[in-house]
Amino acid sequence: MRFPEGFVLGSATASYQIEGAVAEDGRTPSVWDVFSHTPGRTYGGDTGDVADDHYHRLDEDLDLMASLGLHAYRFSVAWPRVVPEGRGAVNRAGLDFYGRLVDGLLERGITPVATLYHWDLPQVLEDRGGWRVRETAEAFAEYAGAVAEALGDRVDTWTTLNEPWCAAFLGYAAGVHAPGATDPLASLRAAHHLNLAHGLGAQAVRAVLPDAKVSVTLNLHVFRPEGETGPEAARRLDAVGNRVFLGPMLEGAYPADLLEDTSAITDWSFVQDGDLEAIRQPIDVLGVNYYSTSHVRLRDAPAEPEPSPWTGADVVEVLPPEGPLTDMGWNIDPAGLTDLLVSLHETYPDLPLMVTENGAAFPDVVEDGAVHDRDRIDYLRRHLAAAQDAIARGADLRGYFVWSLMDNFEWALGYSKRFGIVHVDYNTLERLPKDSARWFAELIRTGDLPDA
């Protein structure tokens, strides 16, 4: 049960979820600042104003990572901290924070993996159209180049985007993520402009760092077809859930069935000449975020179906998940990770893969100064074993990042869900490694999967 030599074991976070200090050192509001301060948008009105206060506790958190022996740390850069007006002047104080972070990682022997966009779009750009308009993709490229120039070759891997599906469809169609729009057309425009941002951003990083290792992270869905109509339901959802990004980024084209399925919403005329060539940039590794699977089938369409970014959510039915479930209500299906990694390897055999997020929320309890999170340890062990199964079946998997390093602001769910392997007391901000953290540290130390 050993991992290959050089297999990377790390942990991941995101800027808005942990940093706090939202109005310090020149940072301007992001879409998530505005969204979380809008009544009714987040659980209990929670915001990321303080979060884990990572901005002020950087050294403490770096020492925490070192104590776990992490090979690598995947963090994200806050765009409004670095370019407060979205375009134009670069904020030196913001860049200096990430410089200290990267230097601190390197001093402790931890490899820095930087994500340039983890959903905290500057609100000033959203006010000008956000991801609905191509100006945002152009602004992203300028920002990406500025960060690459500042941090230079100290960063091992440059990830352009994290989970653009969530930004596009949860943010612009479902309305449950920032900016909270419910417009199917806007979501498809956003998906394209996020694709374009990836391509332009990759070009901008390599213009500064010709030998840069460039990546993108996608939350690729695994659909389990149910009954006779299941395969058609899975095809529809795969088109708008997965291939809407894989197609342009890796093959230089949007899938024909996606264009047909969404023809009632748009003619895709916002895709301009040269866009697809710009989007299809060579990447050195594909990041894969995986948590659960979905069982799907077609349902009887209502008399007056309305266009949906899911090519008819009124037509496709996602069945209620069967247990066991995490605290998020997501099913636990480690085999889905194996299936996904093997499928990607078979489709793109020359493309290295990295699990950039995997983990689970459970209702943790502190007892006598400890968190005995056996459910999380079992979850991680089973999914790491599933990753090993994928390697045995030929997948070129280079590493695994547990989500998350510590409990944090879980987007619209506020502080009600805990994904961390380190517990955070939100009153005192004290960090407490859970049993899962010690388990993960033992895995890193030995290279063998410890017992659950």
Image (tube, helix red, strand yellow):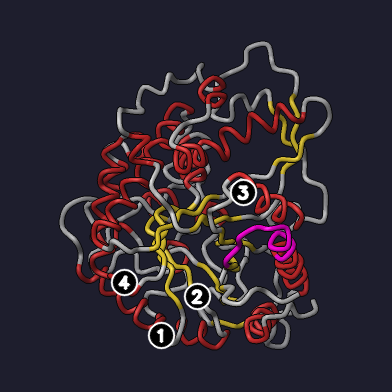
User: Quadrant of the rendered structure where residue 357 is?
Assistant: bottom right
Residue type, numbered disc 2 = Ala
Q: Nearer the viewer, residue 12 or 238?
A: 238
Query: Real-space Cα distance between discs 1 and 3?
Result: 38 Å
Q: Is residue 280 above or below residue 312?
A: below
Q: Quadrant of residue 75?
A: bottom left
CA gap, disc 2 to disc 3?
23 Å
Query: Which segment is the magenta one?
Result: 388-398
**Mark 4 residue type:** Asp
- Report the disc number at residue 398: none
> Quick one: label 1 or label 4, which is nearer the N terminus?
1
Q: Which residue is mark 1?
A: 59
Front label number (1 vs 4): 4
Q: Residue 119, image x and y in percent? A: 42, 52
Q: Name the amino acid, label 1.
A: Asp
Viewer-nearest of labels 2 and 4?
4
In whole angstroms, how far apart are the C-alphas of marks 4 and 3?
29 Å
- Occupied quadrant, residue 447: bottom right
Categorize mark 1 by other alpha carbons within 10 Å: few (<14), some (14-19), many (20+).
some
- Helix, strand or loop at disc 4? helix
Residue 344 is labelled as 3
Which amino acid, mark 3? Leu
Q: What x and y, as percent, mark residue 348?
A: 57, 47
Estimate the spatial distance between the alpha carbons at disc 1 and disc 2, rounded to whole Å. Answer: 16 Å
Say what secondary structure mark 1 lies in: helix
Q: Position of residue 108 (x, y in %)?
A: 44, 87
Give me the residue at 56% from left, 33% from top.
240
Asked if residue 321 lies in the magenta stretch, the reply is no
Q: Is residue 180 visible?
A: no
